[in-house]
Image (cartoon, coloured by chain):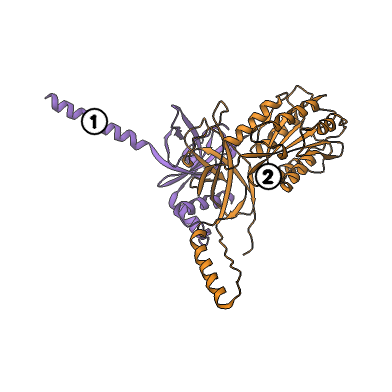
């Protein structure tokens, strides 16, 4: 009987762990610039509509974070919201904000989501606009250039 | 920093070319000119790494940093190494206008003596320029530790105008003209940062320093004890070239220590040009893991597409 309880506990524990892991996602930061800071978080709807607005003259770091399916353009809440530019960035969401954990510290940095676009769309945008550039041929580079095109228009 | 052609295949191709050239000259008796070109664009970026206590970090690898070039994050590098430069080529640029602290020329002369006795700096590699009035002047070049240079500097009359930006452009030209391979060009400017008469702008001065590949160290020697616009200008110009700013009354020894420390804590990274956009490419460098790392590099470089 004790063994059965132990087995149940183990199964439950592993399920909870899997769920927790499921909430965390991975991506890669491909672009970074200092941009105008945003006002209080506008949420997913504002991000999807691209209507998030600037609030002050302060410059905050803006990152383009590429995940498997979605590309996020995120803006730090202060000018000091810098994150390490590692190959893999782990993130998750909380109350319409994107949180990035810095490896060496216990705290997470919160970012306002300025824009969200399906990755496939970015790939398509770039394929159309820079298809003839022989130096940007990898999928990551195509996506990267697509974001650049989009930001400049 | 510069953008140059990479010759990664050079060592493979070169023996074949030499062999072909040898055969050709045997047959005709005339040695044809062998010309080969490669069109791979490469960026070379020198940077300095220190910890939070401003101590040199000497164990970095390519995986510890990422470069942001024109907003694009670059993590794949062609090469990553400690700098090969072991010598400094120093131009000391001294403000002789009325607004600087009286009597500091004597202090500068002491700094020159100190530099000339410092390991890793040859007396021949030190030049001293002054500016005040309408144009900069060369006080000495290579023989600055002698009594003549000291006398020249201490008798320099205080001028009422300060052509700081023109002087920086002049110093950058001077350093480019006298550049010695294997030596890092450094400009150390002692000034209050208040330009009053230059034809050049602050941007021109920064561009000139970037063009000469010199690192600018700026020491505030203004008479004012408040944070001034001049100090802010000195700070921004020095940071744009990857150098440092030293606040009011920092002594010459600590400035020299910082310059030498930078020489020994510097790295050079090379990577493929991330885009062919001509003009200025803004560059910043960031850690990939340890945010306590302090990384400094120049603010960017100019890229111009060459006609094929």
Q: Colour of chain A?
A: purple
Query: Which chain's residue wears label 2?
Result: B
* Image spot of residue B69 (x, y percent): 57, 46
Query: Which chain's residue wears label 1?
Result: A
In terms of depth relative to the viewer, which is nearer, B99 or B12? Answer: B12
* Image spot of residue B262 (x, y percent): 61, 34
Farthest-out residue, bottom: B28
- How many numbered marks appear? 2
> According to the image, label 1 marks what residue?
A12
Disc ID at residue B112: none
In terms of depth relative to the viewer, which is nearer, B59 or A116? Answer: B59
Q: Circle 2 — which element?
A: helix
Q: Circle 1 — which element?
A: helix
Can residue B279 be seen in the rendering of this structure?
A: no
Provide the letter of the chain coloured orange: B
Q: Nearer the viewer, mark 1 or mark 2?
A: 2
**Residue B282 lies in quadrant:** top right
Disc 1 versus disc 2: distance between alpha carbons?
61 Å
Disc ID at residue B210: 2
Q: Image point 71% across, 40% down: which residue?
A: B125
Question: Dot 1, how many residues are within 10 Å of its Cα: few (below 14), some (14-19), or many (20+)?
Answer: few
């Amino acid at each position: 009987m004790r063994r059965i309880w132990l087995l149940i506990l183990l199964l439950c524990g592993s399920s909870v762990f899997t769920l927790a892991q499921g909430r965390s996602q991975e991506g890669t930061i491909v672009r970074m610039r200092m941009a105008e800071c945003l006002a209080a978080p506008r949420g997913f709807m504002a991000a999807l509509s691209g209507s998030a607005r600037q609030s002050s003259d302060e410059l905050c770091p803006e990152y383009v974070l590429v995940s498997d399916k979605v590309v996020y353009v995120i803006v730090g809440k202060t000018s000091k919201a810098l994150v390490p530019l590692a190959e893999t960035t782990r993130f998750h969401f909380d109350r319409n904000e994107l949180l990035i954990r810095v490896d060496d510290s216990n705290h997470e940095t919160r970012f306002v989501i300025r824009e969200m676009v399906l990755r496939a769309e970015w790939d398509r945008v770039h394929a159309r606009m820079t298809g003839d550039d022989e130096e940007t041929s990898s999928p990551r580079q195509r996506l990267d250039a697509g974001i650049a095109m989009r930001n400049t228009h | 920093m510069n953008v140059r052609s990479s010759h990664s295949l050079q060592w493979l191709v070169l023996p074949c070319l030499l062999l072909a050239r040898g055969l050709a000259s045997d047959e005709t008796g005339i040695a044809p000119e062998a010309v080969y070109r490669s069109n791979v664009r490469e960026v070379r970026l020198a940077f300095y790494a220190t910890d939070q206590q401003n101590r040199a970090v000497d164990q970095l690898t390519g995986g510890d940093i990422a470069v942001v070039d024109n907003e694009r994050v670059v993590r794949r590098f062609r090469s990553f190494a400690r700098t090969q430069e072991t010598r400094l080529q120093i131009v000391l640029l001294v403000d002789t206008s009325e607004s600087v602290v009286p009597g500091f020329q004597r202090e500068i002369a002491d700094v020159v003596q100190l530099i000339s006795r410092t390991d890793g700096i040859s007396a021949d590699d030190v030049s001293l320029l002054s500016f005040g009035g309408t144009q900069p002047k060369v006080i000495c070049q290579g023989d600055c530790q002698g009594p003549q240079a000291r006398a020249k500097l201490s008798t320099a009359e205080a001028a009422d105008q300060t052509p700081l930006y023109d002087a920086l452009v002049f110093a950058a030209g001077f350093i480019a003209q006298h550049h010695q391979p294997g030596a890092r060009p450094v400009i150390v400017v002692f000034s209050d940062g208040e330009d009053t008469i230059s034809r050049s702008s602050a941007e021109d001065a920064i561009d000139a320093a970037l063009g000469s590949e010199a690192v600018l160290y700026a020491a505030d020697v203004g008479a004012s004890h408040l944070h001034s616009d001049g100090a802010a200008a000195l700070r921004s110009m020095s940071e744009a070239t990857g150098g440092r700013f030293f606040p009011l009354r920092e002594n010459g020894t600590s400035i020299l220590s910082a310059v030498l420390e930078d020489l020994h804590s510097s790295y050079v990274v090379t990577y493929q040009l991330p885009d062919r956009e001509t003009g200025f490419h803004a560059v910043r460098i960031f850690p990939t893991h340890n945010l306590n790392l302090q990384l400094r590099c120049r603010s960017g470089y100019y890229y111009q597409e060459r006609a094929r």
